[in-house]
Image (cartoon, rainbow, N blue to C red):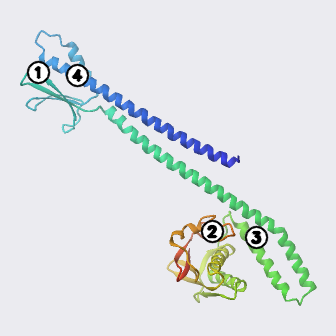
Amino acid sequence: MQWADRIKRIRIALIIAAVLLSVASLVVSHYLVRDLKREEQVKMETWAEAMRSLGEADSNADLSLVLKVLNSNNTIPVKVVDAEGRVQMERNVEEESATLPHSIRIALSEKEWLDVYYTDSLLLRRLALWPYVQLGIVFVFVLVAIYALLSSKKSEQNKVWVGLSKETAHQLGTPISSLMAWVEVLRETYPDDVLIPEMGRDVERLQLIAERFSKIGSLPELKSTDVRDVVARVADYIRNRASNHVAIATDMPEERVEVPLCAPLFEWVVENLCKNAIDAMESKGSITIVVKQEAYQCVIEVADTGKGIPSGRWKTIFLPGFTTKSRGWGLGLSLAKRIVEEYHRGRIYVKSSSPENGTVFRIELRS
């Protein structure tokens, strides 16, 4: 068993143990409150009998024990009312309007009686509320524990992707450097060959990809960049490598649109959206990339004429591992979301999608 799985099992076991202990505490509290309630009921019955004895006593009776019983009640609110509704005695009652739900009738004669009204003591009432407080504490604890588990899982996944990205960049570094050297040798040997410059551009492209992978997991440096230049480079790159049946168009303002960007990473986002669009259109259709300035933000929209995305999947498509293709790991849109929202403090989402009109992805960046 891997260490991460073992830690996860231990965390789950601790949560279950905490919940079981809390439930056990609730059960014990319930029985404790019930027993104390019965004990207070017996005490009040004894107190009522003492009141009866006091009411029936003559001048020669020894009332020391009766008075001791009556005076021993220092916690239970009690009120004694005669047959005409007049209050004869009250103890531990803080407010005159206090509700005393329990009652015991003391018959003094056929026409005379006393009603002893009482309620639970303050201690018993607090103990009765304590299980609900415990439930609240347990509920909050479980929520925090679940959040911690999900956060730790997400953190572990992020470490895996970051480690994979950096290792990929590291592994690509040596062969790319070698290819760059060979391209220079070929340029000197065959200066008139038209294919060598194209090969050089592909090697530069590999170097850019390695640079992008190396930036994943670390906070990139954002520089003020004209978004139009980034979009134009992506459009040219996709146009040169897409099928002749795919039309790539751009709609951008004439004035500069300056936004703090990490250009290599943001190009990756737009490229990914374009490549997904080509797959959705099955390499036949049109893609339009729109750049516009709205209030205090820059908006980039990538629209295609593909088969659309069901509305129920508009959010799940950004989750790691989600893919509708038979190949791939389903990381493209997940990384795009991370680059836009975590690195650039922007927002990316599906603006609209339908089989008739295709899909429009919208990116919002603060200017």
3D distance between C-alphas at marks 1 and 2: 86 Å
Q: Which residue is mark 4?
A: 47
Q: Nearer the viewer, residue 87 or 160?
A: 160
Mark in front: 2 vs 3: 2
Question: Of callouts 3 and 4, which one flags the residue occurring earlier in the amino acid sequence?
Answer: 4
Q: Position of residue 217 (x, y in %)?
A: 68, 63
3D distance between C-alphas at marks 2 and 4: 76 Å
In the displayed structure, does residue 173 sit left or right of residue 236? right
Q: Position of residue 346 (x, y in %)?
A: 56, 71
Give the amino acid type for the residue marked by disc 3 in the picture.
Ala
Farthest residue, direction front: 326
Q: Which residue is mark 1?
A: 108
Q: Are discs 1 and 2 less than 8 Å apart at CB? A: no
Q: Which residue is mark 3?
A: 210
3D distance between C-alphas at marks 3 and 1: 99 Å
Counting labels gives 4
Tell me the SS state at disc 1: loop
Give the amino acid type for the residue marked by disc 2 in the picture.
Thr
Farthest residue, direction left: 111
Q: Position of residue 6 (x, y in %)?
A: 66, 45
Q: Which residue is mark 2?
A: 323
Give the residue at x 27% y 29%. 76
Give the amino acid type for the residue marked by disc 4 in the picture.
Trp
Tell me the SS state at disc 2: loop
Residue 74 shows up from this direction: no
Q: Within 10 Å of the Cα at label 2, are there few (<14), some (14-19), or many (20+) other Cα atoms?
A: some
Q: Are discs 3 and 4 less than 8 Å apart at CB? A: no
Give the amino acid type for the residue marked by disc 1 in the picture.
Leu
Tell me the SS state at disc 3: helix
Q: Are discs 1 and 4 less than 8 Å apart at CB? A: no
Q: Where is the C terminus found, in terms of image quarters? A: bottom right
